[in-house]
Amino acid sequence: MIEGISLGLATALSIKNLAMVIAGCLIGTFIGMLPGLGPMSIIAIMIPVAISIGDPSAALIMLAGVYYGAIFGGSTSSILINAPGVASTVATSFDGYPLARSGKAGKALTVAAIASFTGGTIGAILLMAFAPALVSVALLFQSPEYFALMVVGLSAIAAFAGSGQVGKALMMTVLGLMMATIGESALFNAPRFTMGIMDLQSGFGFITLAMALFALPEAIFLILDPNRSKTGDGDGSGKITGLRISGSEAREIAPVVGRQSIQGFLIGVLPGAGATIASFLGYAVERNIASPEDQKQFGKGSIKGLAAPESANNAACTGSFVPLLTLGIPGSGTTAILLGALVALNVQPGPRLMIENPEIFWAVIMSMYLGNVILLILNLPLIPYIAKLLAIPRNYLIPFILFFTLMGAYIGQNNATELLFMTGLGVIATVLRFAGYPLAPLLIGFILGPMMENNFARAANIADGVSFMWERPMTLGLLILAALLVFMPSFRARRQAARKAAAGD
Amino acid sequence: MTLERTIGLLFLLFCCLYGYTAYVGMDHLLPPILKRAPVWPSSFPKILSIVGALIAVAVIVSSKPSEVNSAESGIDYRRLQDYKFGQALFLIGSMVAYALLLRPIGFIAATTLFLAGGAFILGERRYSLMIPIALVGTIVVWYLVQEILGIFLSPWPRLF
């Protein structure tokens, strides 16, 4: 592992890659602060840029920097103007905004930055410990197990989607898998489901789909609801003073940060759970275990209430890299986009990544650590200046967001028809969001689709049929796990309903 | 019928069409030698169409209204009547126009028009501000993409 760390540090600390981390963090922070643009949209927009860099380590390092920066930027706008840019920083605004209102904006930002930094750092250390162990298990897997593992991953994403959402999430996953079969596949060398449309011959571009699913609906919601792009309740700039926190405050938040970093990381590792659940759960847990006097402060400007979701969401972001880097299975929309970027850069993700491209594997882990340091020392002092940019008027902000979305899809493919596909899919995605359908499973299904079909075909060719599903114990075990994951929530809901009915009688 | 169920129904229809293509429209194109392989190009789609149809039926049957989590989706359903659907439609229309005009009139003209037009649709009327911002934004992005990233963007109208 020491070798890996030094290799990672050597790669991440090269001037070029260091510049990538800094650029990624700054761009991420800046865009993450703007209302309505979450990390997924920002990463999707940045992918053509990353691909044009060419070097997979540098590209992935930049994208990881963008990811962290975006989360940090989201926290900043939550605290300063009560306008969380992303769902995972909603819990940050519960106590962050009251602190800012009471003139302690500087302190709140520092607490958030330190909590994020510690969460991210502890997450990175846990990732270093977890990942190699998981890789050694995953290396035992063959095509049938891979296929089954992907079924488990996709089922888990749906199972953790929330109550009443499991069916809808599964539906979106299957839709994603179906969309992945459109066009020519490497496996069969023949186009499928193209309906005679030439531009569908090569299938949907994943950047086009990522833009259509995340960036465009977000922009359309900004247009539909002017309140979303209002720059919050405060003016957000000019009053940020007193960035220091006292020793007693540091001692107060230390145990909170420690607990939530570990809890957040573990939640982040689970497919489909992610930073939003981690931050809400972190906030709730800390409120419940706080002393009665402290409990009263929650929601009115408690630094514990601010530190908890901040450390949890950053640790969860790092945790979500575990399944991506070790199994090649993304657990969230953001890591799915990163996986797509890896594939576009000709890097085969999965357990062999650590063996075949150790420099990429370790450089990404080390750059997470560096990214956290950079956010702390570079971004914190710059926040008062960046915050001034929040005042960009809506009339100009929205056309530019739409334009960047279009550009993202266009420069990846250099095909104007792709823009029409994106706009059409974006409108459909917006309608799906109106009906409460989660969109991340669609993208994850789309990206995993070809890999899943390849492994299925390989396993079936070797076994001369689908008997591998029940003949190999590990495959069977994984498939049973997948079935349990899907059916458990509905069983539990039915039991609860029955119990409620019994209590009502 | 709720929007949720309608979408479930549409998805069921889509699964039927997709499944029909997989079951009826694909296998006869397969060369005889490949027919001996256990997995055909239509195998995985066939499984997907059945699984998809089953899930769609489950969603249609089990969906209840008021399950939509507005905190997660960020949609305020009580204020739906205040939503600016007209502006959104015009902006989506202008994205389509942009896609169609990008090649014929070139990047600079199409983008400037799109950015200025977008601001206009959103209610901006200060032309002296709107046009310079659109033009400067366009040129900066063109320079970044073409010169820094090295991706070719044809800036001027195509003459033939």
Image (cartoon, rainbow, N blue to C red):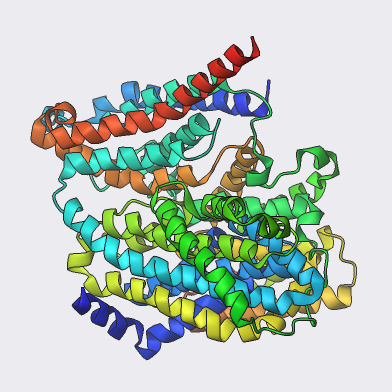
Asked if residue B102 shows in the view, the reply is: no
Position of A237 relative to A481 (above/below): below
Which quadrant of the figure has residue A95? Answer: bottom right
Q: Position of residue A190 (x, y in %)?
A: 27, 41
Find residue A354 and report its image quarter. bottom left
Residue shown at 75% from the left, 47% from the top: B89
Q: Quick one: which residue is furthest to the right in this view?
A: B125
- Quarter of the image with the C terminus of chain A is top right
- Residue drawn at (47%, 42%) of the image: A442
Q: Is A198 placed left or right of A403 in the picture?
A: left
From this view, report whether residue A504 is shown above or below residue A313.
Answer: above
Horizontal and vertical percent position of residue A102: 81, 71
Find the residue positioned furthest to the bottom: A15
Point out the image quarter for the N terminus of chain A: bottom left
Q: Is residue A15 above or below residue A375?
A: below
Q: Report the front residue among A470 and B151.
A: A470
Question: Could you tell me residue A146's position as x and y percent?
Answer: 22, 44
Q: Image check: A284 left or right of A43?
A: right
